[in-house]
Image (cartoon, grey):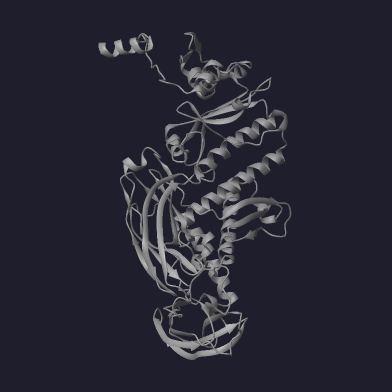
Amino acid sequence: MRSALNYLNENTGLEPITIKGSRIIVIEPIQDLINAIENDTFIADIEETWWRIINKYNAKIKVQKFDGTYKNAEIPREYTENPDLSECLYKNSSIQIPGYSKILTLGLGISNNEIREDLRNVYLYRKDMKLAEIPLNIPEELQNRYYGYVEVDEDFEEEIIRIEDLEHYGFTSKKSKVFQQLKLTVTNEHDNLMEDRGYVNKKVAQDENLQNELLEASAELDEFLNTMDFGGEIASGKSLPKIELKWHGIQFPDEEGNRLTLGDCVSNIKFSVKNHYATSKEFKLRLSIKCENSTLIELSDITSRIAPGASELYGPFDFEITERLRRFKKHSIVLEVFPVRSTKVEKIEAPFYYDVDQIVPEHREFSLKLASINLPNENSKRVDTSQSVNNITYNITNNSAYTAKLALHIATYMGDRENELLEHVLLRTDIIVEAHNGLIVSCPDIEFLKETYEDKILKGPVEIRTILSAADDFGIYETADIICKNPPLTVYLNQEGGFINQTFKDVLMIEGDEYRSNINGIKGDWTFSLYKDHPSYVKVADHEESRKEYLIEEMLKQTIRVHLSDNNYSILAMFSEDLSDIEDLSYAELLHYSYSIVDKIQLKRQQG
């Protein structure tokens, strides 16, 4: 103890403090910190963040400058120019929030004078320290003078911790249910004050409240559907496959790839057809050589019956470059398959070039898809320190005319920062994939070791990124050319979150009564619109519970429309309906399934 006291005095010239508390000594401070202390920016930042502690507990916080003088942190003068904070303009205590215990204190104030920017607006405080802004619609004439604070109980604080960002100055998701509930409650109190003071009219306040309820309903519905696990993100646009076609090799002349000339022979053409229908079906299989949509050579035209779930292999076939083909043109080996008595055709193509060079890569010449992965926590993308992600395999498909030597690179990155590397997991440069063929590559486990990650990230989103590149020159590719990437897989280190699909990017209120609700947009960018003059809505507008149920049911109907518009029919099978022949359903049957799913989801949601 004595040696520590001597060290302190000899190295800093300071004596031990004699009162209860803590002293922080910064060794070799950077110049920015020195400047902030000298010009009082540092003490102002402390006052901004900790003024509730100073006000509630009479806490003494002081900063010593380099000349030995001290400055005490105080409640910002912009707040004290008004009546005492405990008597601020509007104060409400113990507000119950459904499902999240209560707000202990909500204080809202209007300053007589302009407030500096970092002290404006209403903020949530956790453990008496400023955390994040609660966005409100503040009238323009008050935007430079309005301030406030929100304090919640311990149970609510535990919910808030889960959506804090790493710097504890914001939220990772403002779409989360806990944030939407908090914002809705604070908004209602804010609206009451604005209406009492004559800054807004009741209609505007009601519209803003409805907007918040729409956002809340959207987040709640997304969260519930996520727990139902009906398969596939909306953005992926996955649909139920019916016929799966795959090449199993095409042998082009050595060294020439798919640039062919008169007399060349293409041989050993093989392919498979897999039947994903629920019943055995007869399929028409046509293999031909085409140029500019014209069939120049018929290689095969057969009918084959395939059992449900079975895959059949066909070939080999071959052909020679003759005068029947068109010189200086791109051609394709085309496989077309369709059920007998159906017009729905599935096809795959393998291009080649007759006395002309390939200039750019063909669309989807290579593909890299995650085939399997095991996350450590069931039904969650959470990964804790020392846990592993394992059984990682990727399916690599080579649809080019060349045997490809490829490199597979896997790395982890900070999920909330664009290119901040965490760990190089794998670099394999010995992957050989034959032309028009594929293989499965197994990868090592990703271990989230404390010594690897702790210095860079304690908690938050982590992206697993995978890149396929050329490990040697082939075709039009040169060594190190990036060929394709797998969409990043996001896991969450030491926290829950992030796995809820966001159906609607925006929600709107429309004046009119032509629809109850509607959607507009394209895949991945849908907008939900509520028609607030529709008689059905008008009847429930003044009844909170009925109004919220109305919003959720309308959003559910439009959510199903979004899925069907994106060719994702899996939502119709979430209660184990057999929809293997979805494209054969009549409009009446499709409508029946859609209505049935709305009823079943609503029943399940209300029972839960």
In the displayed structure, would residue 221 be above or below residue 265?
Answer: above
Image quarter for residue 567? bottom right
Q: Is residue 217 left or right of residue 498?
A: right
- Residue 378: x and y, percent? 35, 54
- Residue 376: x and y, percent? 33, 52
Quadrant in which the N terminus is drawn: top left
Q: Work out whether residue 338 or residue 430 is closer to the camera in this orientation and state it.
A: 430
Q: Work out whether residue 491 or residue 466 is closer to the camera in this orientation and state it.
A: 466
In the displayed structure, would residue 263 be above or below residue 402?
Answer: below
Q: Is residue 232 visible?
A: yes
Q: Is residue 363 left or right of residue 249?
A: right
In the displayed structure, would residue 490 be above or below residue 193?
Answer: below
Residue in view at x 66 percent, y 42 percent: 208
Q: Is residue 330 left or right of residue 277?
A: right
- Residue 60: x and y, percent? 46, 14
- Residue 337: x and y, percent? 51, 83
Q: Work out whether residue 60 or residue 286 is closer to the camera in this orientation and state it.
A: 286
